[in-house]
Image (tube, helix red, strand yellow):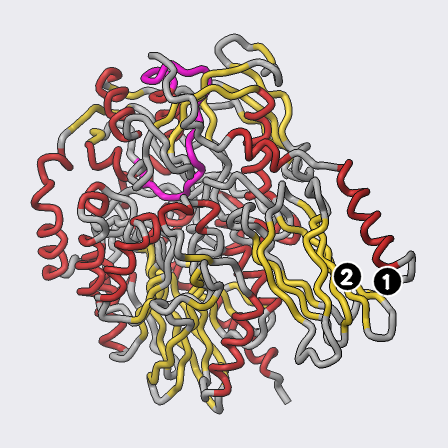
Amino acid sequence: MISRRDFLQTTMAASAIYGSAGFGNWSRLAAQQAMTQDQLLEFDTFGNVSLIHVTDIHAQLKPIYFREPEINLGVGAAKGQVPHITGQDFRKLYGINDGSPSAYALTHDDFSALAQSYGRVGGMDRVATVINRIRADRPDALLLDGGDTWHGSYTCYQTEGQDMVNVMNALKPDAMTFHWEFTLGSARVDEIVEGLPFVALGQNIFDSEWDEPAELFKPYKMFETGGVKVAVIGQAFPYMPIANPRWMFPEYSFGIRDERMQEMVEEVRANGAELVVCLSHNGFDVDRKMASTVSGIDVILSGHTHDALPEPVLVGETIIIASGSNGKFVSRVDLDVRDGRMMGFRHKLFPIFSDVIDPDPQVTALIDEQRAPYKDKLEEVIGQTDTLLYRRGNFNGSWDDLICDALISEREADIAMSPGVRWGPSILPGQDITREDIWNVTSMTYGEAYRTEMTGEFIHVILEDVADNLFNPDPFYQQGGDMVRIGGMGYRIDVSKPQGSRISDMTLLKTGEAIDPAKTYVVAGWASVNEGTEGPQIWDVVEDHIRKQGTVSLNPNNSVQVVGA
Amino acid sequence: MKLTRRHALVMGAGAALANCITLPAFASLGDDAIAAFTGGAEVGDTGITLTAPAIAENGNTVPVSVDAPGAAEIMVLAMGNPTPAVGTFKFGELAGSQAASTRIRLAGTQDVVAIAKMADGTFVKASSNVKVTIGGCGG
């Protein structure tokens, strides 16, 4: 008799073949310059349930460029495993041709050149078209938003998330979970959530005072779709009060709470759930570990670490789906659920090529309506760039280098620090840099650019501390950001070492001298989690710097030496 | 540009620095407390559950709970604190359960230890490493 496990693996293989065939098609079509919407969105409806996953949109309503990471190192059990595979290795693994549309969508190489051929990606009006198309196949498909939706742009900041709420409501999600939303402040989050026309989920969102489940957020919701009882359990970002300012949402506590996740799985199964879906903002490695510590989850829709994977990852009998970020991808998962269990699946990660997928005119109008009051501010050209500006990667991206340069020159500092966040679109060489572009990589509710003094020893402590949040071999200790970006200082990092001995050879670049642990340096940075931080807003600092430059031109940054990978 | 508002230090310099320094001197204090509690008896590791976060949201108030069915006393220690003793919970014969929860302050990343003295005089122990971090860079 074929066991369920074998069956899953069989369908996994079939799905892999299906996926590869899909990718092959795009490549060939690209060569013919004839990629069409129908071909891109082709999907043979399967089983009786469809899930649509969007996550980590970071308020990107309009099409953008977004370069995927070149450096994404895995440690411990995740070493050499997806999503810690990039570039050519990634293309080889998934059978993607160099220079193909999927190479452009999923890997970093030749980004500027390929961007000229394949254009911008994303745009919530294009995402709407894809969702509508899936709903045409399967009217009761569940649309699930993994969070980091109400953060990341000029208009989102000015409207305190209302622009995103208005546009997302038009797409009619069925459920959502959260992370950066909480940086709007708990009063604003509560206000929005109370008015949402869909359920706000997070089994790990607790009342911090009483250490009890928070009333406003439900642990799960049961849906009936295709004659199947589907439970969707929410998992918000576990380390919100650590990675983001706790003082902005003091009433809430989070954590992984995997024991409670197990209890919730058992509760929904007892209530008749035939399919258990976890809508997660854990980050990929945390989800992979959770899939092995919690039993009975069929599908994890994984967010937070911004990974885009063209095939599900199978852990035991759980499939994990990773759907990218910034509106660049939509995942569709069709499932065959019979006799109370998942018997097979079919999956496709749709890259949202904005020139191929028609915008939904109603959603375009709605987006333009949100932007209209700020149009002049958004479109003002601040400068140009000769260099590709991007952020994603474990260490400095060129956007970060530019931000650090701005901090050092505008705030007269020796050393600059910029947070290792994973959001922020890219700008191609030759493009104008508008105010909107600057806000897309800096917008947040705690953007004050501080200037302070730190000893060499303390700088070392910070680097070690952040490195352990990224390279701790136990995923449950990882917070899902990248390494803090440093300007004005070089260092060496051995990612295989334990905390306290990863960072060495810290060097002040302007003099070439070794950093003295006892000496004091002037450090400028932004995005402090401490209450009462003072300084100009980072977007103003960066804007002033770019205006003075006129045209931005950056040298390659070789100041971080990485070993042990 | 003039350096202003020194007190508005960005990363909570003092506190964070203390967090990351290991405090080996205090570890022996914790070991001494364990030896005094157990009288040097052998300590098992089953029958006791200690629940503590992997990473503390706030090192100044870390929720911990411990459950040891059949225990007469449970001692909780923060091994890296200058004063490791957190408290000892004593359960009478009529106690409905042998469980306790509290919030503790942790000076930095360290092990939190709970040791239960069972009704029969044997001891069991559970330990959990709680990380106290600067944080601030989540994606």
Horizontal and vertical percent position of residue A540: 25, 27
Looking at the rendered structure, the kind of residue marked 1 is Val
Chain letter of disc 2 in the image: B
Q: Quick one: quadrant of the C terminus of chain A?
A: top right
What number is the disc on residue A105?
A: none
- Residue receiving disc 1: B43
Secondary structure that dominates the magenta span: loop
| Above or below for B84 versus A40 | above
Looking at the rendered structure, the kind of residue marked 2 is Ile
| Above or below for A542 versus B25 | above
Horizontal and vertical percent position of residue A66: 33, 43
Q: What element carries label 1?
A: strand
User: What span is colored magenta in the figure?
Assistant: A408-426
Which quarter of the picture shows residue A39?
A: bottom left
Q: Quick one: quadrant of the N terminus of chain A?
A: bottom right
Q: Nearer the viewer, residue A462 or B10?
A: B10
Q: Do tags 1 and 2 sit on the same chain?
A: yes
Horizontal and vertical percent position of residue B138: 45, 45
Assess whether residue B36 is covered by the magenta stretch: no
Chain letter of disc 1 in the image: B
Horizontal and vertical percent position of residue A520: 53, 15
**From this viewpoint, is residue A475 visible?**
no
Q: Residue furthest top?
A: A511
**From this viewpoint, is residue B25 visible?**
yes
Q: Is residue A443 left or right of residue A234?
A: left
Q: Which of A326 and A283 is in front in this view?
A: A283
Q: Is residue B73 left or right of residue A330?
A: right
What number is the disc on residue B115?
A: 2
Q: Is mark 2 on a helix, strand or loop?
A: strand
Q: Is residue A486 left or right of residue A412?
A: right
Q: Which residue is drawn at 61% across and 67% down?
A: A292
